Image (cartoon, helix red, strand yellow):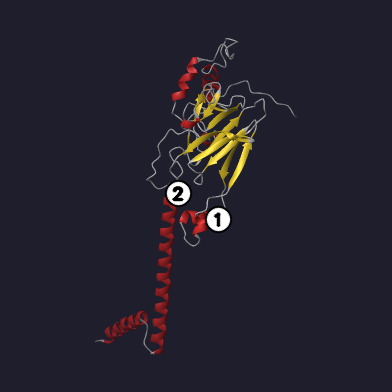
């Protein structure tokens, strides 16, 4: 009938109290949600909650309404930042990522034409930045009066043959294997310049002003040519994983393979035994000899007949 009526009865009043009262959204003060008034200070206690289980009284609404958008109990935290980034919650405002930076271009100041800052506005020294392989970095270019963008050159993944030769160190074509990968220039204006730092990156990358490569900053890349696993565990790194243990899926696969091999061997043994018995039966029949079971039955019958005829 195209009508919708809301049930006025709250299914579980305790959840309503927790979500709305504890976070301040149901406070009697009409200005409690104002930026000036702030929220219920008790919501700050949610930061250290670790009871993320299914039966826990802590629920996602309480976290979100309590001003937590990056929390270990919230799902899909690996999607909050770009690959390899770790988020930090800023209560009531959102969250920041440690692989995200803001860039301000001002060519009228030739001494510092490119300024790099964090989300909170703190200006950082580019020489102190260290990029990690396996992490995707986002440099957000802010709008400037000149409308200039930020550019860099990144190595490209070549064809599969090229990658295999670089990884395996094949000497079949030294000139090809030792040649540097091709590079591509990318730029961004009033938006993010996304740089996925991988194993092909050199020890340094240069970010320069669009149209003027002389105005630039140099960022260092870690010397290890492997992906930084410690930094690339997800967007909320709060638990050290045991890398020495095999994953449960791998253990199940190994058990399945062993069981399958055992069944194949057992089946082959049964087939061979049956074929051997059939072959022996055919040979005995050709020689006029009874097969073992028939011979035993004849001996048993003969013994019984002799016993009955004995006076």
Which of the two marks, 1 or 2, is nearer to us in this view? 1
Where residue 151 appears, x then y in whole percent? Answer: 60, 37
Q: Nearer the viewer, residue 15 or 87?
A: 87
Q: Nearer the viewer, residue 303 or 47?
A: 47
Please indicate, yes or no, whether residue 82 appears anywhere in the rendered image.
no
Where residue 206 appears, x then y in whole percent? Answer: 54, 37
Mark closest to the chain's N terminus, 1 or 2: 1
Query: Tag 1's secondary structure?
Result: helix
Q: Residue furthest bottom?
A: 287
Give me the residue at 47% from left, 54% from top.
167
Where residue 111 appears, x then y in whole percent? Answer: 55, 26
- As drawn, the label of residue 70 is none
Which picture quadrant has residue 273?
bottom left
Vertical side of 44 occupied by 192: above or below: below
Give me the residue at 56% from left, 13% from top.
27
- Crowding at mark 2 (Cα within 10 Å: few <14, some 14-19, many 20+): few
- As drawn, the label of residue 249 is 2
On screen, residue 131 versus residue 301, left or right, reads right
Q: Work out how far the residue at label 1 is from the one at label 2, CA to CA, in angstroms.
A: 29 Å
Query: Tag 2's secondary structure?
Result: helix
Where residue 18 appears, x then y in whole percent? Answer: 51, 20
- As drawn, the label of residue 160 is 1
Which picture quadrant has residue 2?
top right
Query: Disc 1 vs disc 2: Cβ atoms closer than 8 Å?
Result: no
Q: Residue furthest right?
A: 1
């Amino acid at each position: 009938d195209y009508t919708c009526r809301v049930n006025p009865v709250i299914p579980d009043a305790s959840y309503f109290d927790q979500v709305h009262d504890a976070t301040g959204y149901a406070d009697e003060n009409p200005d409690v949600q104002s930026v000036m008034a702030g929220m219920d200070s008790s919501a700050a206690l949610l930061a250290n909650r670790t009871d993320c289980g299914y039966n826990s009284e802590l629920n996602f609404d309480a976290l979100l309404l309590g001003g937590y958008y990056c929390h270990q109990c919230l799902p899909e935290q690996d999607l909050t930042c770009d690959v390899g980034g770790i988020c930090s919650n800023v209560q009531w405002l959102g969250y920041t990522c440690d692989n995200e930076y803001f860039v301000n271009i001002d060519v009228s100041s030739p001494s510092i034409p490119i300024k790099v800052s964090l989300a909170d506005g703190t200006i950082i020294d580019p020489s102190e930045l260290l990029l990690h392989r396996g992490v995707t970095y986002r440099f957000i270019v802010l709008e400037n009066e000149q409308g200039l963008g930020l550019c860099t050159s990144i190595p490209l993944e070549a064809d599969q043959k090229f990658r295999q030769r670089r990884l395996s160190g094949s000497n079949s074509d030294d000139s090809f294997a030792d040649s540097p990968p091709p590079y591509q220039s990318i730029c961004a204006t009033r938006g993010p310049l996304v740089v996925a730092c991988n194993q092909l990156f050199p020890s340094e990358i240069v970010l320069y002003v669009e149209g003027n490569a002389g105005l630039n900053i140099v960022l260092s890349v870690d010397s290890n040519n492997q992906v930084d696993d410690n930094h690339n565990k997800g967007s909320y790194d709060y638990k050290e994983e045991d890398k020495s243990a095999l994953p449960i899926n791998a253990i199940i696969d190994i058990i399945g393979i062993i069981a399958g091999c055992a069944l194949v061997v057992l089946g082959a043994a049964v087939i061979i035994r049956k074929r051997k018995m059939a072959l022996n039966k055919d040979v005995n029949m050709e020689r006029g000899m009874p097969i073992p079971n028939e011979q035993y039955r004849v001996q048993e019958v003969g013994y019984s007949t002799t016993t009955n005829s004995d006076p």
